[in-house]
Image (tube, helix red, strand yellow):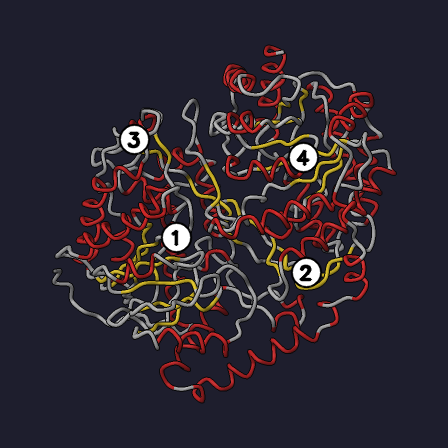
């Protein structure tokens, strides 16, 4: 048994807080450092100031400064990367970046994340069913786990010296290993989880360091426990029991909160409850209320405030849930369902949304206030929080009564949809019609859609939005950029062109600003990966298209070239996944509303002479439920929404789609079910590892595995791309293969874009 010193768990807490800064200070500091415009000391100073501001802000919102209520969850780039460098799990290609103690400085840390020269970065993929991307650790038999560096402990001490007793947050050993991939040195069939017994002592050493520094509680995140990410669920549960029994028995450690956000803990809850850990965090927004589990002696951090979405909570319902958990014998603390880094910082500055819509919303700061309100009501009685509870009830009533949330015209249009509206002609019929229309070569080349968004483009768009640039001048500026992009692609020799999307600030927000039922924020940024931030739109009501959205830009671009220029749309599932979506009706209903709007747009593009139309669904897998039992229903409505959007297209209209950050093997049936004529996928970082599954499935339509990882500033060589294309041809017949980057080029510069596309064309010619 351990000799852990008991300390009460806070009555209200959160599992994490946004890391980028209210004004994206971390993004700006990182990018300045990467450009060489500032030093590592400058970056460290910015980060320290952000951490200090966060501690002060959370204490001001009602979290106890000295009760371990404030989490310490900062990261410069990614928490999985932080775990990898902390535990010494650095791939051998980066071994020369280590200091003598095994640690890495921020320059080396950035290289592991972004790559450099011939050193490819860690692979990147989606964090469960969120829009956050994590870096995938590479683990093999050769990996030597060792506590490397003191940054996590130093950040706890930093808070302590400022008068705060925070709660360090670290990624758990099960999540770290189950989400890792086998290293290049590992033999076929190696599973990183086989190294659990080697990793646990390093976790114990870290816990001892936190204890020595004065930490009373530490939070260990294990979202893998709510997901069917491993074939053998019983093995996952056995590893959880073994791992946390062993860690709980350590003599020198703080008290442990094992947090399991992102879904329902279900059969893992009694397993954790039987171990010596003192507290368990459960997601009660997406997860189920525990039934028949005795939790006497345990603290339950009950996640009743939604950390995934931005809607104001039903506090009465949350209180009822908290009391139901108390009835199981647990000591209950109010918590968020997951870290708040999935939502923006604050509603302050968003007054343009209007008083009524604002009253329906809660960003991170407002959610902290909801936690504080519930903690007061739970511990002191509802009368002590009567005003806040009444305000929440009024907001819910206002939202339900708003006419925009139930439009008869939108509901009638959906009711009129027939089964044949979800189907196109057989692919062979379409393929023949498209071949006769376009006469494309084998290994046709294209890009995914966007081209670099230069400072000049952003300045013009901002000036126009503020009224400082006339409509005519703005249109002229955008057309000039489109003409440059089309000319560049023709000069390079690409086969199918794009217009570059200069007019679009974001692939979802652009449509949100043109569709009824949406609103957009000014500063509602959330972290997507590293320094990359997105500003999700707010889908609050029924969706309709007042007028065409993309036709004039696509038509202009097509007028500049004899080669086909793709019309570019964002698909219904991705629009939902990358927005904060209303939670008062099924997602499938909302997706079909968006799909009907896109169906109208496709018809208008066809009428304008656009023959290739890409409907991007990069987030198809993102919303895939974490439990197997729920996946079929999701894939049914998501695939049908895409088909509703696209099945009105003519036979000789070539429909493309794009998918990224997906473990495609588990959704290959759904990809096939989309019935797109050409599907481009992200494949460069994984070196085409998805293609055998596509081949074995018997996929027979066009496929474009990405050959250029656009998330890294590296310019891939002709030889590198040639090698990837050769690998691709080993699985997919040449007549099916397309050649394209992994994703859009919005975040890249023109110099690297030109050089990379030149190499892509040269490699294609060599392989042809």
Q: Circle 4: is it few (<14), some (14-19), or many (20+) Cα within 10 Å?
A: many
What is the distance, in whole Å, between disc 1 and disc 3 at their CAs?
22 Å
Q: Which residue is mark 3?
A: 140
Q: Position of residue 260 (x, y in %)?
A: 37, 57
User: Is the residue marked by circle 3 packed among few (<14), some (14-19), or many (20+) residues within 10 Å?
Assistant: many
Task: Name the residue tied to disc 4.
Answer: 449
The span from disc 4 to disc 1 (Cα, nearest Å) is 34 Å
Question: If you read the primary sequence from the N terminus, does the residue marked by circle 3 or circle 2 appear first?
Answer: 3
Alpha-carbon span between mark 1 and mark 2: 31 Å
167 sits to left or right of 708: left
Instruction: Identify the residue position indicated by label 2 in the image.
Output: 519
SS at circle 1: helix
- Name the quarter where the N terminus is drawn: bottom left
| Image x and y of residue 565, in percent | 77, 30
Q: Which residue is mark 1?
A: 223
Q: Dot 1: within a 10 Å radius of its alpha carbon, few (fewer than 14), some, or many (20 or more) residues?
A: many
What residue is at 32 percent from the left and 24 percent from the top? 187
Q: Earlier in the sequence, mark 1 or mark 2?
A: 1
Seen from the viewer's position, the closer of residues 407 and 112 is 407
């Amino acid at each position: 048994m351990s000799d852990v010193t008991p300390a009460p768990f806070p009555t209200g807490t959160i599992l994490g807080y946004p890391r980028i800064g209210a004004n994206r200070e971390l993004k700006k500091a990182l990018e300045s450092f990467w450009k060489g415009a500032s030093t590592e000391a400058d970056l460290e100073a910015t980060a320290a100031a952000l951490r200090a501001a966060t501690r002060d802000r959370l204490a001001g919102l009602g979290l106890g400064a000295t009760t371990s209520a404030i989490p310490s969850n900062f990261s410069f780039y990614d928490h999985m990367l932080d775990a990898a460098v902390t535990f010494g799990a650095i791939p051998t290609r980066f071994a020369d970046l280590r200091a003598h103690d095994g640690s890495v400085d921020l320059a080396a840390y950035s290289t592991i994340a972004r790559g450099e020269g011939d050193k490819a970065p860690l692979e990147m993929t989606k964090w469960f069913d969120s829009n956050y991307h994590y870096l995938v650790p590479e683990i093999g038999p050769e990996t030597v786990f060792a506590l490397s560096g003191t940054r996590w402990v130093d950040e706890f001490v930093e808070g302590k010296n400022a008068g705060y007793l925070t709660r360090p947050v670290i990624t758990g050993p099960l999540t770290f290993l189950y989400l890792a991939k086998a290293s290049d040195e590992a033999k076929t069939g190696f599973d990183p989880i086989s190294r659990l017994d080697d990793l646990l002592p390093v976790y114990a050493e870290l816990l001892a360091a936190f204890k020595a520094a004065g930490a009373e509680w530490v939070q260990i995140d294990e979202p893998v426990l709510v997901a069917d990410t491993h074939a053998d669920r019983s093995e996952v549960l056995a590893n959880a029991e073994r791992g946390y029994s062993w860690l709980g028995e350590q003599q020198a450690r703080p008290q442990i909160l094992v947090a399991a956000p992102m879904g329902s803990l279900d059969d893992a809850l009694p397993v954790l409850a039987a171990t010596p850990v003192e507290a368990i965090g459960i997601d009660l927004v997406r997860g189920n209320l525990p039934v028949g589990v005795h939790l006497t002696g345990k603290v339950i951090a009950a996640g009743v405030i939604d950390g995934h979405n931005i809607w104001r909570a039903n506090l009465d319902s949350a209180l009822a849930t908290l009391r139901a958990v108390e009835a199981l014998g647990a000591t209950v603390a109010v918590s968020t369902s997951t870290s708040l880094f999935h939502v923006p910082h604050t509603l302050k500055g968003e007054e343009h949304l209007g008083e009524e819509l604002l009253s329906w919303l809660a960003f991170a700061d407002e959610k902290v206030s909801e936690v504080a309100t519930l903690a007061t009501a739970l511990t002191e009685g509802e009368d002590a929080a009567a005003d806040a509870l009444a305000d929440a009830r009024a907001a819910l009533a206002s939202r339900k009564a708003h006419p925009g949330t139930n439009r008869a015209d939108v509901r009638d249009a959906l009711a009129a949809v027939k089964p044949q509206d979800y189907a196109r002609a057989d692919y062979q019929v379409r393929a023949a019609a498209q071949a006769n229309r376009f006469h494309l070569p084998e290994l046709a080349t294209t890009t995914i859609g966007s081209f670099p968004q230069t400072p000049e483009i952003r300045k013009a768009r901002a000036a126009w939005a503020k009224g400082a640039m006339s409509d005519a001048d703005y249109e002229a500026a955008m057309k000039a950029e489109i003409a440059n992009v089309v000319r560049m692609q023709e000069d390079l020799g690409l086969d199918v062109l794009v217009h570059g999307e200069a007019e679009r600030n974001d692939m979802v927000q652009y449509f949100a600003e043109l569709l009824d039922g949406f609103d957009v924020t000014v500063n509602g940024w959330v972290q997507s990966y590293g320094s990359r931030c997105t500003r999700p739109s707010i889908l609050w009501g029924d969706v309709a298209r007042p007028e065409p959205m993309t036709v004039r830009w696509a038509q202009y671009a097509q007028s500049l070239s004899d080669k086909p220029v793709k019309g570019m749309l964002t698909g219904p599932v991705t629009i939902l996944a990358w927005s904060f979506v209303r939670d008062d009706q099924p997602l499938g209903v909302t997706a079909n509303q968006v799909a009907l709007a896109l169906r109208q747009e496709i018809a208008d593009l066809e009428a304008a002479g656009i023959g290739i139309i890409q409907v991007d669904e990069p987030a198809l897998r993102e919303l895939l439920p974490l439990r197997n039992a729920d996946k079929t229903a999701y894939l049914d409505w998501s695939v049908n929404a895409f088909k509703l959007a696209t099945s009105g297209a003519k036979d000789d209209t070539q429909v493309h789609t794009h998918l990224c950050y997906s473990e495609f093997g588990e959704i290959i049936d759904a990809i096939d079910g989309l019935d797109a004529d050409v599907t481009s996928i992200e494949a460069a970082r994984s070196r085409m590892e998805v293609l055998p599954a596509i081949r074995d499935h018997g996929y027979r339509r066009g496929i474009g595995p990405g050959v250029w990882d656009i998330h890294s500033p590296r310019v891939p060589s002709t030889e590198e791309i040639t090698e990837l294309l050769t690998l691709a041809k080993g699985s997919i017949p040449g007549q099916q293969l397309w050649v394209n980057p992994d994703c859009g080029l919005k975040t890249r510069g023109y110099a690297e874009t030109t050089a990379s596309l030149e190499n892509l064309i040269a490699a294609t010619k060599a392989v042809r």
